[in-house]
Amino acid sequence: MKNIIVYIFLFLSQAFLAQNSFDKGNALYQKGQYQEAIQVYESIIKDGSQHSSELYFNLGNCYYKLNNVAPAIYHYEKALVLKPNDKETLNNLKFAKKLTIDEIKEIPKVGFAKLLQNFTGVFSYNTWALISVGIAFAFLLSFIGYYFSRHTLSKRIYFIIMFVFIFTLLITVSAGTSEKNQYDNDRPAIVFAESCAVTNEPKKGEPAILTLHEGAKVYVLQSLANWRKIELTDGTEGWIDASAIKEVK
């Protein structure tokens, strides 16, 4: 019991200190001291005392104010991992992307794949899991009502409600599983090098099929020693030096 109290005290103390540091960073940002605010925010991440979309969003804003394109885009993307579809983050990310050199078209998904992604992407997989637990609990209550009910009509009503909950549960579990698979397989990365070559083979001296610049977004498909096979949003694939990019997750 004593150990539990100590752990709770340490946790609350760390959370309190992290919030104080976060507030300090926010105050520095409001004063236009962006570099100093970055140092405070980065220290919070380094000691692991806080991990939130707001923290990464604020870091992105600081780097954007300093015209540091790659770090700004990188931290906006980090914020979106924790809080998908956040309008304010998406809006700031759009402005940050305007500072990049590369104009890479994005091939949108169409048909059923687009509808499925739009539906499952409404919530994170953690949120889908919580919704599933809530529905499962509601199903359990309905089953109890069905089991103890003595009237035929009420039994039928409870049975229909149970069927609806089971159907809804299957949908939410499937959506959560799909979103989890998407999260695990999706490896976005941001180019931090001022410029870097993309080649057909993971070899030094290979001719470049294209050149990417700071702030470009790619997706890592494969890792091989100091090379990464990447895919661009327009579907182009190639190999890039691992040191030129920084993975978001």
Image: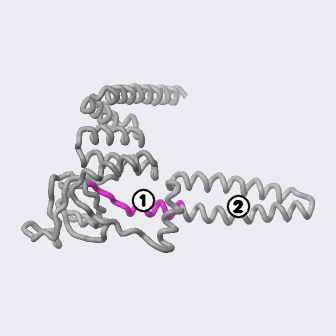
- When the figure is inspected, residue 55 is found, relative to residue 237, above or below; the finding is above
Q: How far is the residue under mark 1 from the one under mark 2?
A: 26 Å
Q: Is residue 80 magenta?
A: no
Quarter of the figure with residue 152: bottom right
The picture quadrant where one finds residue 30 is top left
- Comparing 117 with 178, the one in front is 117
User: Which residue sits at x=19%, y=57%?
Assistant: 213
Considering depth in this image, is 28 or 189 the residue closer to the camera?
Answer: 28
Reading the image, the residue beneath label 2 is: 165
Q: Which residue is mark 1?
A: 183
Q: What are the residue bounds of the magenta stretch?
A: 176-190
Element under label 2? helix
Tell me which amino acid carries mark 2.
Phe
Residue 204: x, y in percent?
A: 9, 66
- Earlier in the chain: of badge 1 and badge 2, it is 2
Element carrying mark 1 = helix
